[in-house]
Image: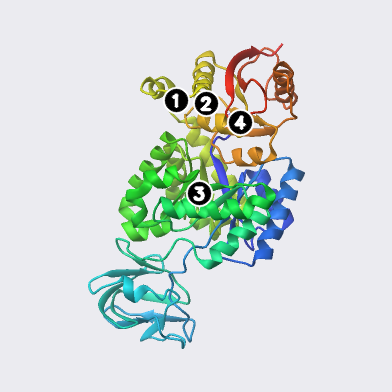
Amino acid sequence: MPRATKIVATLGPASSDREVLERLLRAGVDVVRLNFSHGKAQDHIDRATLVREVAAQVGKPVALMADLQGPKIRVGKFAEGKVMLVNGQSFVLDAARTEPGDLGGVGLDYKELPRDVKPGDTLLLNDGLIVLTVEAVKGEQVHTIVKIGGELSNNKGINKQGGGLTAPALTAKDMEDIKTAMSFQCDYLAVSFPKNATDMEMARQLANVAGEPYRHKPAMIAKIERYEAIPHLESILKASDGIMVARGDLAVEVGNAAVPALQKKMIRMAREMDKITITATQMMESMIQNPVPTRAEVSDVANAVLDGTDAVMLSAETAAGKYPVETVEQMHLIALEAERAEDVRLDANFSDRTFARIDQSIAMGALFTAHHLGCKAIVALTESGSTALWMSRHNIHVPIFGLTTQPRSVARMALYRNVRPLQMESFTDRDAALVAAERILVGRGILRPGDTYAITCGEPMGYPGGTNMLKVCRVG
């Protein structure tokens, strides 16, 4: 049984070399993430070109995801690069300060902080490792007392417990970065810190305008990392193609203990709404330094797989870690084992569902039929990839093959759980297309003589949303 859950790997200094990148793709990477928090525009353009070259060489469909930086809610720099804060001491966050910071205080990249906080608020710095209580706000200065001290270094992030920072999701830098990402036609665009559906709608509009010269529209991923986003989850999902469960900032704002249940809720809601999910942050963190993961990390990855996530994501592990390829290999093995234990309950899934659209009904019929007949494969002849996406929202131990004439649909389907995208030539005749599809699958060793498979397509051929036929075939 091939692995259903996809692996997203972040490129960085440890993985931008052609040889390492090739090893990563062969080890199981399906989506490559370009993190716009680091590097210049040309770096990302060059890396995107390299990824596509290596993917073609390896013969594997790989999606490119551009991840926007979002607002820089951070402290400034220190004269010595860092300070050691002690419990009980005073510390001033000063939006007007231009000189480097010291033990008494530091400047702010985020100038709106004095307007966003009030006495009694709790500020969490450096991913919650340092906790400050706001004592007073005087003009541009936020006076605080250190509740939990530690080392604070240059440009560490600031969160407010319970949310409430007003920073817009899209900065001027993000708007420029969207143009860069569209210049290489990224398949997915991830938006950092959206608070509501409007943030995602605005990002989509900007991306569509920037992509117009290339006739390209990327799929939009909302990174759920703000407290304010949680009540608006449903509307954010409607405005997006998928979400990233970004557990780092989210955990700092809502508290660590709340995150596992939120993760399950988000994945369940996304699947019900036919959207995709990526589970991210610290999944294999210890492998930045160590050649094997901890038992807790193994459980974490396995649980995300059992929750039904489309993909599990690696950040620093592949961008800057010592063992990028080994990390992907471990993640691949963990996901495979977890999938073997999955419960397939298609009958129960469909008993309370109604499908108003013909193409959706055909997709569900293919799953049901393949499950009960023990088919070797489900094949969707699809222009946009929608039929394959709907099929992939349900657990089934039958691999789904998305056959399309569109190169962009091939790349987009690389992120869908349990979907293997393949490109095929265009046909106007349905029967010729069905014969060609079988020939491709037999040629790749996926189907053998005597195997049964379910195949869906639309007539007339070549129109998105036109799937209206399901056929069960046996290889002769």
SS for dot 4 = loop
Mark 2 or mark 1, earlier in chain: 1
Q: Which residue is mark 2?
A: 397
- What numbered label is drawn on residue 109? none
Neighbor class of circle 3 (other Cα within 10 Å; few <14, some 14-19, many 20+) is many
Q: Amino acid at mark 2?
A: His
Tell me: 114 left or right of 276: left
Number of marks in picture: 4
CA gap, disc 2 and disc 1: 7 Å
CA gap, disc 4 and disc 2: 27 Å
Q: Nearer the viewer, mark 3 or mark 2?
A: 3
As drawn, 370 above or below 382: above
SS for dot 1 = loop
Q: Are marks 3 and 2 in contact (CB under 8 Å)?
A: no
Q: Amino acid at mark 4?
A: Pro
Q: Which residue is mark 1?
A: 344
The percent position of residue 317, horizontal first and vertical second, equals 55, 57
Q: Which quadrant of the structure image shows residue 439?
A: top right
Q: Which quadrant of the structure image shows residue 225?
A: bottom left
Q: Is residue 285 visible?
A: yes
CA gap, disc 4 and disc 1: 29 Å
Q: Amino acid at mark 1?
A: Val
Neighbor class of circle 1 (other Cα within 10 Å; few <14, some 14-19, many 20+) is few
Q: Amino acid at mark 3?
A: Ile
Mark 4 or mark 2, earlier in chain: 2
As drawn, 170 above or below 81: above
Mark 4 or mark 1, earlier in chain: 1
Neighbor class of circle 4 (other Cα within 10 Å; few <14, some 14-19, many 20+) is some
As drawn, 236 above or below 473: below
Q: Which residue is mark 4?
A: 464
